[in-house]
Image (tube, grey):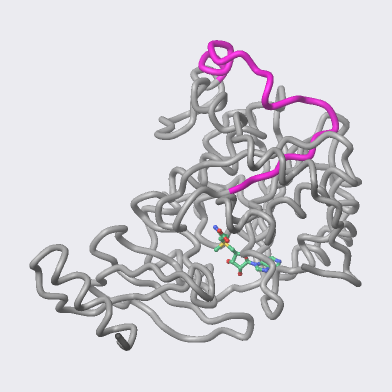
Amino acid sequence: WSFTKTQFFDRMMYESTNIPPEGNWNYEYITQNLIQAERVKNILFSGRTPYQSVMIVDGENYGRSLLLDGKTQSTEADEFIYHEALVQPAMLAHSNPRTIFIAGGGEGATAREILMHRSVTKAVMVDIDAEVVKLCKKYLPNHHGGAFDDPRLDLHYGDAFRYLAKIDDRFDVIIIDVPDPLEAGPAYSLFTKEFYTLAKSKLSPQGLLVAQAGPTGPTLNEQCFTVVSHTINNVFGSTYPYEALVPSFGGTWGFVIGSKGPNPASIDRNVLDEQIKMRIAGTLKFFDGTTNDGLFSIPKYLRNSLDNETRVITCDAPL
Ligand code: SAM
C-alpha cells in the first residue's frame, strides 16, 4: 500500500462517507507525523509578510481561520474557547484589572475579551506584524468584534519584548498571545526566562501573567507546555497551569498563569459567576465558575509530566 497524501485522504473520505472528496482541502501538520484537513470554500488571503507566512481561509467546518507559518491560530467556530480560556481566568482572578498588556494577539479577539471588562481603562497591544493585524481587521470581523475601534485600545507594532523593556508603565495583567516558539518564528524570545522576568517587573503588586503554552495531549505536552510552565514557575514561584479542548488545534491546549498574588484556581464557582455578572459587559460562551473548576483540574499524566520537568527556557537555550 502506497498512497500520496491526497490519494489517501480521498480514499478514506469516500470509504467512510460515500461523499466524493471534491473541492479544495487545507492540510495542516499538527506534528511531522499527524495531519488534519478541512474542506475550504475560499482562500481569502495567502502571502508572506516580513515576519511570517499568512493564510486566511473560509473553511466548511470552522469558518474563517487565520494560519501563520502553516499553523492554525484561531477559527471563527471555536476561537471563543481559546480566547476566553486565555484571558478570563487571569482577568477575573485580579480584583480590579485596569491596565493590561497584550503581546501579539493579531486577530483582536484577545483585546475583545479584555475590553469586555468594565474596570479596564487601557489595553496596550503590541503585535510585531502590522500586515497581519490589517488582514485580521478586514477578514475576521467576528474575531475582533470591533475591538480595534475601542478608544481604550492602544495598539503598537513591534517586538513585544523590546517594547516592554523600554516603557515604565505597570500592568495588572499581561497576556502573551503569540504563536508557539518555532525555531524560525518571531515569537521564541517571548517564551524565555528573560522575558518572563521582565514581564514580572512590569506587573503591579497583585499582577498576573498568562501565556498560551501549546498542546497538552499525551504525546505532545513535553514539546512546549511543561517547559513553559517550569520556566514561568522559575520566575514567579506560583504557577497555575491549565488546559482547554480547542478542536481546531487538534486537541487540548495549555495555558500557564504566573501570579504575584491571586490564585485563579481557588475561586469558588458561585463567587466567580457573580463576578462575571458584575464585571463583564456582554456574554461569555465558554467561561464561568464551573468551567474554571474544570480548566484547572488537569489530568494525572499531565501533572506527572509537570512534576518531572526540569528544563528552563533562556535566550541562550531557546525551545
Ligand atoms: N492564538 C495563537 C496561537 O495559538 O498560537 C496566537 C495568535 S496571534 C495571531 C499571534 C500574533 O503574535 C501574530 O499576530 C504575530 O504577528 C504576533 N507575534 C509573533 N511574534 C511576536 C513578537 N515577538 N512580538 C509581538 N507580536 C508577535
Quadrant where the image shows the C terminus:
bottom right
Residue 270 lies in the magenta-colored region: yes
Q: Is residue 247 left or right of residue 212?
A: left
- Asked if residue 79 is positioned above or below residue 42 in the image, the reply reads above
Q: Quadrant of the N terminus?
A: bottom left
- Which residue occupies 87% across, 70% down? 317
Determine whether, in the image, residue 115 is placed left or right of residue 178. Answer: left
Q: Nearer the viewer, residue 135 or 294?
A: 294
Q: How many marks?
A: 0
**Residue 80 image position (x, y, % from top left):** 43, 44
The magenta stretch spans residue 203:
no
At a point 84% along the width and 34% down the height, the residue shown is: 238
Relative placement, left or right, of 314 versus 76 is right
* Residue 265, x across and y down, in percent: 67, 25
Q: Which residues are magenta?
A: 254-275
- Residue 242, position in %: x, y? 63, 38
Q: Position of residue 111 (x, y in %)?
A: 56, 48
Residue at 55% in and 51% down: 217
